[in-house]
Amino acid sequence: MSLRGLQFLCLLSAGSLFALTGLRQFFVEPLATGLSNSLWFAIQVLPLLLVIPGMLRLKARSFLLAGLAAMLYFSHGVLLAVAPEHRALGFWEVGFALALVMTTAFAVRHLNRAGALSEPDDSQPDDDR
């Protein structure tokens, strides 16, 4: 798969986690006030919002951090899946988090290969020295 395809899948998974978190926070389990809902939603999606600009610029570090952030959503989804009333939301969250982890792993591997091929080899002596 191409790097642009992996980038699209990563962004799609991150956007799906963002949307699922908003759905849960504002419609399924809303807090007492709109301000507290908005603040709690911002705290929950902050890890995704911080890495998306780097993912758009194809930075390997941002893809790695997105995969690590997806582990937070995976853990939360497992906790939701245990409760019978939110089982479906939990399974969706686990699925999107796993998709994000897998696609970021492939993207980081692809970016590292491309970077290794484009960097000069320091093991060869230069003739200029």
Image: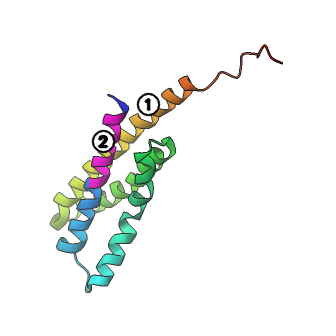
**Location of residue 129 by image quarter:** top right
Q: Is residue 37 left or right of residue 43?
A: left
Q: Is residue 13 left or right of residue 110?
A: left
Helix, strand or loop at label 1? It is helix
User: What secondary structure predominates along the stretch shown in magenta?
Assistant: helix
**Quadrant for the N terminus in the image:** top left
Q: Residue at (42%, 54%) from the top-left corner?
A: 69
* Position in image of residue 101 (x %, y %): 37, 44
Give the magenta-colored segment's residue range.
Answer: 4-15
Mark 1, residue position: 110
* Position in image of residue 78 (x %, y %): 29, 57
Mark 2, residue position: 8
Q: CA distance from mark 2 to mark 1?
A: 14 Å
Residue at the extreme front: 128
Q: Nearer the viewer, residue 114 or 69?
A: 114
Q: Residue at (25%, 54%) from the top-left corner?
A: 16
- Judge whether 62 appears above or below 128 on screen: below
Q: Nearer the viewer, residue 54 or 23?
A: 54
Asked whether 83 falls inside the magenta stretch, the response is no
